[in-house]
């Protein structure tokens, strides 16, 4: 196998604007079929992307030529289609957040392992080379001993008929955007937090969380604090503060493929702005996922293990908000 044939489950905005175009430009994957709840929507996408085969979700699942699926349905529907895909022998690239609970994440990973298929949560930002540069700065102690990761990720107003405001479909800012700084801090520190404290602002009309602040502490006295929300001026950044300075990465989570990333470093010995050349991190994610299917052990982290650890921290955030207390990660089982 030199190329993976992929089917699309869910004609979402991110699939249309980012993921499918990246698939078409990737070297080790071919777009085989597009599936939507609506045949009209599937047909529309098939015309846009010149894909001959289209249909509903089950058509994609039952297509024997398809090796893997990309799932971009609402979060609340992820488990259903991950399980169906796995049981049909398809590898799964699932949009973040993977699901709505830790129990659901465990079930998805279990079924995928039983069916010998791979499951990856689609955090495309992880594959942008800017984060590798940040990790090198951490390891080289460019700003000394790290004390704090801080991040902001927020969006201008979104219409309340958007699925992000649908509680039963897994809507809300924690699943939508809070997952990013949680994943970023875990990735950069190469460890899991000891515990979290999370506070969610709940919209009275829709009962979904529209703003969130959360704190995590890691071994070695390292801390992480982040704020995310709707109805805010757009921000997408993180900052590291150390004993000898700080660094700031702009457009940390969703940077256009034609935009260079800007890394600003200030320390006692240096003050500089580093430009990281533009890349398509969706393309890099897709190629890495497909390489793992083709070659095995080609990626620098375990997809399923990371999905479970991420889901555990997300669950701790929900418990913390509901019970208004600090929650140790070891409590989540």
Image (cartoon, rainbow, N blue to C red):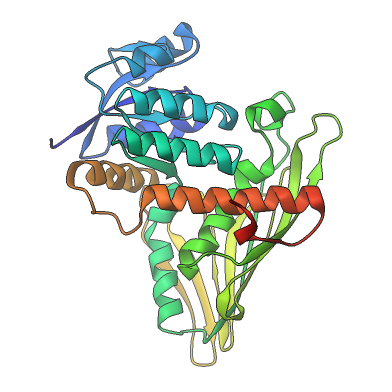
Q: Is residue 12 among what the camera can see?
A: no
Name the one closer to the observer, 268 or 54. Answer: 54
**Quadrant housing residue 4:** top left
Q: Residue at x 53, y 52 (%)?
A: 310
Q: Residue at x 42, y 38 (%)?
A: 110
Above/below status of 140 relative to 189? below
**Quadrant housing residue 22:** top left
Name the one closer to the observer, 198 or 130. Answer: 198
x and y percent of residue 172 in the render? Answer: 69, 38
Q: Is residue 310 left or right of residue 158?
A: left
- The extreme right residue here reads 204
x and y percent of residue 109 in the render? Answer: 42, 40
The quadrant in which the N terminus is found is top left
x and y percent of residue 165 in the render? Answer: 71, 30
Q: Is residue 33 left or right of residue 240?
A: left
x and y percent of residue 273 in the render? Answer: 48, 74
Q: Residue at x 35, y 52 (%)?
A: 279
- The extreme top residue here reads 39
Q: Is residue 79 left or right of residue 130?
A: right
Counting the numbered discs, the total is 0
Q: Is residue 202 among what the camera can see?
A: yes
Above/below status of 7 relative to 176? above
Q: Residue at x 86, y 34 (%)?
A: 204
**Quadrant housing residue 226:** bottom right
């Amino acid at each position: 196998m030199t190329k993976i044939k992929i089917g699309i489950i869910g004609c979402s905005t991110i699939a249309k604007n980012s993921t499918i175009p990246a698939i078409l430009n990737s070297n080790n994957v071919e777009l085989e079929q597009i599936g939507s709840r609506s045949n009209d929507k599937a047909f529309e996408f098939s015309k846009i992307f010149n894909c001959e085969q289209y249909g509903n979700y089950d058509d994609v699942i039952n297509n024997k030529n398809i090796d893997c699926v990309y799932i971009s349905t609402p979060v609340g529907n992820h488990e259903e289609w991950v399980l169906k895909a796995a049981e049909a022998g398809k590898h799964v690239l699932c949009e973040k957040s993977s699901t709505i609970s830790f129990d659901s994440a465990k079930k998805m990973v279990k079924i995928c392992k039983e069916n010998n298929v791979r499951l990856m949560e689609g955090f495309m930002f992880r594959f942008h080379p800017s984060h590798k540069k940040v990790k090198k700065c951490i390891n080289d102690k460019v700003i000394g001993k790290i004390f704090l990761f801080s991040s902001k990720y927020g969006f201008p107003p979104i219409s309340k008929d958007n699925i992000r405001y649908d509680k039963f479909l897994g809507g809300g800012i924690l699943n939508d955007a809070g997952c990013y700084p949680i994943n970023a801090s875990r990735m950069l520190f190469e460890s899991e937090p000891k515990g979290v404290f999370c506070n969610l602002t709940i919209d009275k009309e829709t009962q979904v969380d529209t703003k969130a602040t959360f704190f995590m502490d890691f071994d070695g006295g390292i801390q992480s604090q982040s704020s995310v929300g709707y109805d805010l001026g757009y921000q997408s950044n993180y900052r590291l503060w150390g004993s000898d300075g700080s660094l700031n990465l702009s457009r940390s989570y969703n940077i256009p493929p034609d935009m260079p990333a800007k890394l600003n470093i200030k320390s006692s010995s240096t003050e500089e702005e580093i430009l990281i050349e533009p890349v398509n991190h969706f393309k890099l994610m897709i190629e890495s996922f497909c390489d793992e299917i083709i070659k095995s052990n080609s990626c620098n982290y375990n997809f399923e293990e990371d999905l479970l650890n991420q889901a555990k921290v997300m669950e701790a955030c929900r418990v913390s908000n509901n019970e208004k207390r600090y929650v140790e990660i070891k409590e989540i089982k």
